[in-house]
Image (cartoon, rainbow, N blue to C red):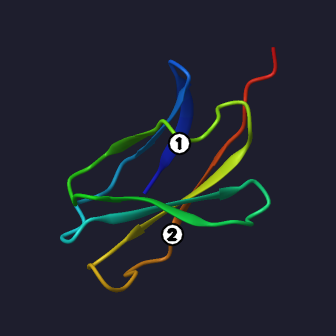
């Protein structure tokens, strides 16, 4: 399941391509670039292919974890996506 991150209008967009929708959706988590302070950002519908994180600063580096989810348990190994601000 490939994916990526990019800055869009001052927010961070997270996108991915799944071979098929997750039946119960995805759990999206964010942490600092070093993996500390991991928090749940959103629970997404199974057909979601992108999410805009308006709460994270695009001037900092972040790590995102996207995992298939059934409402109680994580069903897969997470897709790990890293965001780093562009150097001007």
Picture quadrant of residue 85: top right
Residue under label 1: 4
Identify which residue is drawn at 31% across, 46% down.
Answer: 49
How dense is the environment of label 1, judged by Cα within 10 Å: few (below 14), some, or many (20 and up)? Answer: some
| Sequence-earlier tag: 2 or 1 | 1
Quadrant where the C terminus lies? top right
Q: CA distance from mark 2 to mark 1?
A: 13 Å
**In-image side of 71 versus 42 (left or right):** left
Q: Residue at x 42, y 57 (%)?
A: 1
* Residue 10, horizontal then vertical, whole percent: 56, 22
Q: In what element is the residue under mark 1?
A: strand
Binning the other alpha carbons within 10 Å of mark 2 as few (below 14), some (14 to 19) or many (20 upward) gives: some
Q: Decide which of 56, 64 is in the foreground and name it.
A: 56
Locate residue 45: give its quadrant: bottom left
Residue 61 in the figure: left or right of residue 9: right
Residue located at (56% from left, 65% from top): 39
Residue 64 location (% of width, % of height): 57, 55
């Amino acid at each position: 399941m490939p994916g990526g991150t990019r800055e869009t209008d001052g927010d961070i967009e997270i996108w991915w391509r799944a071979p098929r929708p997750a039946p119960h959706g995805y759990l999206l988590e964010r942490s600092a670039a070093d993996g500390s302070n991991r928090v749940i950002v959103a629970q997404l519908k199974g057909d979601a292919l992108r999410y805009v994180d308006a709460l994270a600063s695009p001037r900092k580096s972040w790590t995102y974890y996207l995992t298939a989810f059934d409402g109680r348990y994580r069903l897969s190994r997470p897709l790990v996506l890293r965001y780093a601000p562009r150097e001007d």
